[in-house]
Amino acid sequence: MQDLQLIKGEHKHLVIAHVSDETAQWHITQEAGSVLTIHLFCLDGEATASHDVLFDIEQAGEHTETYIYGLGVISGKQQVNVRTRVRHSVPNGKSNQLLKFAVKDEAQGAFIGELIVAPHAQHTEAMQTNRNVLLSPAATMHTQPQLEIYADDVKCSHGATTGQIDESALFYMQQRGIAIDEARQLLLTAFFHDVIASLGEPETEERIQQRISDKLKY
């Protein structure tokens, strides 16, 4: 378990990069004016491993920002459970969550995203997006967005989808001479692009992309 306190003041930024090869819990309280950015990568672990990750965040001060970017390739017989909880307890907060997962073989994934806006947390802007792609018939992904909004002057949205890779796009690329495995890789690279780009560091982005490609090999 990790516990962090962000101190009040201008330009207080904290960036967390977590690789999910073990169970972990982060409990974070943000004070006024703080900015928290989380990058979560579920790309490691044994083929039969089970991992649980929790990010529990409270915005306790005004003009606070929270960004959570996550991606994962879950394979073998892995079980990966990711849970986020963002609590807007005061006005004028902002949060954005974007998490994407690709699940293959007999692996199981789950995402639970809780977004809670307190009655007096007016002028909150909060978005949550979860996108998932299943790469084999036995793969499963459970997604459960949970919004509890008790204030009326807010801008909040959420979206969650789970589906298969676009067969028409695969066919189109094959018709132009691209091998099917390469076509899958290209489509999944595009699928993860916006999460990878959130890193803002080309060398790190390239390393993450290579790890994704290695784990996606058929």
Image (cartoon, rainbow, N blue to C red):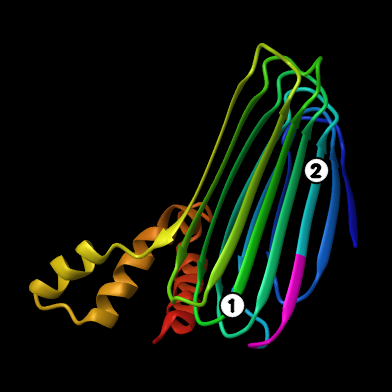
In the image, taking residue 17 as reference, residue 76 lies left or right, namely left
Q: SS for tag 1?
A: loop
Q: Is residue 134 magenta?
A: no
On residue 57, which mark appears? Answer: 2
Where residue 131 appears, x then y in whole percent? 49, 53
Residue located at (61% from left, 59% from top): 142
Question: In this rendering, is residue 134 above or below 116?
Answer: below
Where residue 44 appears, x then y in whole percent? 63, 80
On residue 184, which mark appears? Answer: none
The residue tagged 1 is 107
Seen from the viewer's position, the closer of residues 10 and 169 is 169
Seen from the viewer's position, the closer of residues 175 and 33 is 175
The reply to whether residue 19 is visible in this rendering is no
Residue located at (41% from left, 85% from top): 217
Residue located at (46% from left, 84% from top): 214
| Kind of residue at badge 2 | Ile
Question: In this rendering, is residue 87 above or below 205?
Answer: above
Where residue 3 appears, x then y in whole percent? 91, 53
Please provide the residue range marked out in magenta: 47-52
Q: Which quadrant would the N terminus be assigned to in this image?
A: bottom right
